């Protein structure tokens, strides 16, 4: 061990120093998501040196210069539209790699405007100025043009280091023929926008962009693409809605991902190496036996294609339907399938032979908006994930319809058989239906997602047969409108994770939450007091999407983390620096 390591461990053993290190690490992690400030607010901000992703919302800067904190790696100029006059306007920061000119900036760029070291450059939505040669430094590897830019590229206007180029909505090369000789040969990813309508000469990509691997020709492209237009180097190819000719091309064999939104598609043109195929919601022609290659593992069908035995390749493991609503002959689904997701239109009878080939292999099934009765024994026996959606009535289930292998179940609850006010005439019928209900609780169930309800959970719903609920660890109500009182003791005792809906805004009382609960998710409308005495001792993690009333001295005693989104600004403003011990800020995924 060298002297530096020895010194570090001596310091680390000091509890005060170690806690201080953790304190600053927490502050650092809290500043990973973007922070939006004005220049004035930035100067006064106590923790500015921890900011890594900064959004400045000023329209202009004092003296045309920005003093960036040393750790900023990403800078977005949200409203900025003042012409840059100082070459060193962003000097002093050596970590800055991403620069986004926001919405309004519309001035010609000059040498020195883009600092050396920038790798990712996003030009503003409003920009329609020409890019002069050698203005963009050689450090830049990715450029995204704004939606209004529609000019011709000049020779050397883009650096030879460029690997990714994305044009915006309006780009059409000013209506003039595309000259790919003005594009850097280093480009690996090229994306054209909605309005692009220029002829691409066969062989031009291969000649001028020899390293091209990803190509997107979006939405409304209507021109004929001739053979040899798409280079052999392309591995990922996307094209739009209205091209009647592209489907007749012989596509390069290197393509592994192909997305088509075309209305006319010749399935036989799909290269044998394609692993991921996504067909859009304008394509409805039938898929015949063996029409698609056996290399495909991920298949998405957008419209109501007619299918028969052999239509789905035997290599497919994941199958997504969008607008599909046809019956399929028994044996259509291959034995390779692991995951199937039906869309919102699907509502066909589940025949006894529908899943016969994948009866053992299928582990995940989403039945979309299916709302029919089906017999026991229909569903594959090794399912781990089973999802019904809001139109499915749980009364449609026969006894033992759901396999015991299911670990995650999404379904609408049926509380009517647990109503204590039922009259005596219905007791026998209710008891029978209760038995049916409990026979469909899988013995392996760990995660229950209850959807589309806002009823009080009956006291005996999770109590009548405790042994069936012992293994349940997570209850997810986030897909419901649930905003009712939770009675003491009505939730499963062994529950470890509880996700409440965005509507939930009820007071917590002592004993309401299960004694073993570790993680609690509170929705966007929750604004009640969180009191230590009403939280279980086991609680270690709190997710906050709203604006609850927190007191630092009354936090749950064993709490370790408070998670929230960087968009939850009112909640973040309500916290002081003491909460940095707990706070974990994340960026929402849409």
Image (cartoon, rainbow, N blue to C red):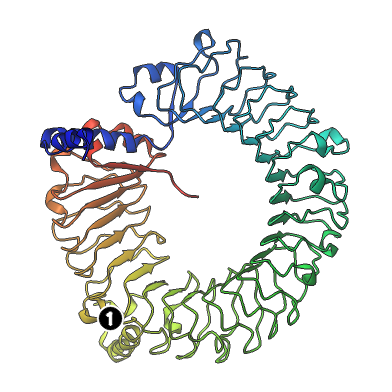
Image spot of residue 467 (x, y percent)? 21, 81
The residue at the point 55 percent across, 18 percent down is 59
Give the residue number, with chain letter if any, for mark 1. 422
| Above or below, 504 relative to 492 | above
Closest to the observer, 135 or 517: 135
Closest to the observer, 84 or 511: 84
Image spot of residue 162 (x, y percent)? 66, 36
The residue at the point 21 percent across, 61 percent down is 517
Image spot of residue 90 (x, y percent)? 51, 18
Mark 1 Cα within 10 Å, few/some/many (few <14, many 20+)? Answer: few
Q: Is residue 162 left or right of residue 510?
A: right
Closest to the observer, 546 or 199: 199
Q: Is residue 198 left or right of residue 423?
A: right
| Above or below, 51 relative to 40 | below
Closest to the observer, 481 or 18: 18
How many numbered discs, if any?
1
| Above or below, 462 relative to 17 | below
Residue 33, picture quadrant: top left
- Residue extending furthest top? 63
Q: Is residue 195 visible?
A: no
The residue at the point 61 percent across, 76 percent down is 315
Residue 355, picture quadrant: bottom right
Image spot of residue 401 (x, y percent)? 42, 87
Residue 331, picture quadrant: bottom right
Report helix, strand or loop for mark 1.
loop
Viewport quadrant of the N terminus? top left
The residue at the point 27 percent across, 84 percent down is 423
Q: Is residue 167 visible?
A: yes
- Residue extending furthest front? 2
| Above or below, 5 relative to 108 | below
Q: Is residue 213 left or right of residue 381?
A: right
């Amino acid at each position: 061990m060298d002297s530096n390591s020895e010194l570090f461990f001596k310091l680390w053993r000091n509890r005060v120093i170690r806690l201080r290190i953790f304190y600053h690490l927490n502050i650092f992690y809290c500043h990973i998501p973007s922070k939006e400030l004005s220049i004035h607010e930035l100067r006064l901000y106590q923790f500015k040196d921890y900011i890594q992703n900064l959004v400045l919302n000023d329209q202009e800067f004092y003296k045309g210069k920005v003093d960036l904190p040393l750790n900023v790696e990403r800078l977005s100029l949200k409203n900025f539209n003042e012409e840059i006059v100082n070459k060193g306007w962003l000097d002093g920061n050596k970590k800055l790699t991403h620069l986004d000119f926001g919405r309004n900036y519309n001035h010609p760029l000059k040498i020195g405007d883009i600092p050396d070291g920038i790798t990712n450059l996003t030009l503003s939505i409003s920009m329609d100025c020409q890019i002069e040669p050698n203005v963009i430094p050689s450090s830049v590897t990715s450029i995204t043009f704004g939606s209004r830019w529609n000019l011709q590229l000049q020779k050397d206007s883009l650096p030879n280091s460029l690997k990714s180029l994305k044009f915006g909505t309006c780009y059409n090369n000013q209506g003039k023929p595309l000259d790919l000789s003005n594009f850097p040969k280093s480009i690996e990813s090229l994306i054209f926008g909605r309005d692009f309508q220029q002829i691409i000469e066969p062989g031009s990509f291969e000649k001028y962009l020899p390293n091209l691997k990803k190509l997107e020709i979006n939405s409304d492209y209507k021109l004929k693409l001739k053979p040899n237009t798409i280079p052999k180097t392309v591995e990922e190819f996307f094209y739009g809605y209205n091209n009647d000719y592209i489907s007749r091309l012989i596509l390069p064999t290197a393509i592994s991902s192909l997305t088509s939104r075309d209305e006319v598609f010749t399935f036989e043109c799909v290269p044998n190496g394609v692993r991921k195929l996504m067909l859009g919601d304008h394509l409805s022609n039938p898929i015949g036996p063996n029409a698609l290659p056996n290399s495909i593992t991920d298949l998405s069908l957008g419209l109501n294609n007619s299918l028969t035995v052999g239509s789905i390749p035997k290599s497919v493991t994941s199958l997504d339907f969008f607008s599909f609503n046809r019956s399929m002959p028994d044996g259509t689904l291959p034995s390779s399938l692991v995951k199937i997701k039906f869309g919102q239109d699907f509502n066909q009878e589940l025949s006894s032979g529908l899943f016969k080939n994948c009866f053992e292999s299928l582990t995940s099934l989403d039945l979309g908006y299916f709302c029919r009765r089906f017999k026991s024994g229909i569903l594959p026996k090794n399912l781990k994930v089973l999802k019904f959606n809001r139109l499915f009535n749980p009364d449609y289930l026969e006894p033992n319809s759901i396999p015991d292998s299911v670990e995650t179940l999404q379904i609408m609850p049926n509380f009517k058989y647990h109503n204590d006010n039922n009259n005596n005439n219905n007791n026998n019928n209710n008891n029978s239906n209760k038995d049916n209900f409990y026979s469909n609780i899988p013995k392996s169930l760990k995660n229950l997602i209850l959807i589309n309800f806002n009823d009080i959970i009956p006291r005996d719903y999770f109590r009548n047969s405790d042994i069936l609920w012992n293994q349940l660890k997570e209850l997810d109500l986030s897909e419901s409108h649930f905003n009712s009182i939770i009675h003491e003791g009505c939730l499963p005792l062994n529950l470890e994770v509880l996700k409440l809906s965005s509507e939930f805004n009820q007071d917590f009382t002592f004993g309401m939450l299960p004694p073993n609960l570790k993680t609690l998710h509170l929705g966007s409308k929750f604004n009640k007091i969180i009191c230590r005495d009403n939280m279980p001792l086991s609680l270690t993690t709190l997710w906050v999407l709203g604006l609850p009333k927190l007191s630092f001295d009354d936090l749950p005693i064993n709490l370790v983390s408070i998670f929230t989104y960087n968009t939850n600004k009112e909640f973040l403003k309500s916290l002081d620096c003491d909460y940095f011990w707990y706070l974990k800020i994340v960026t929402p995924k849409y």
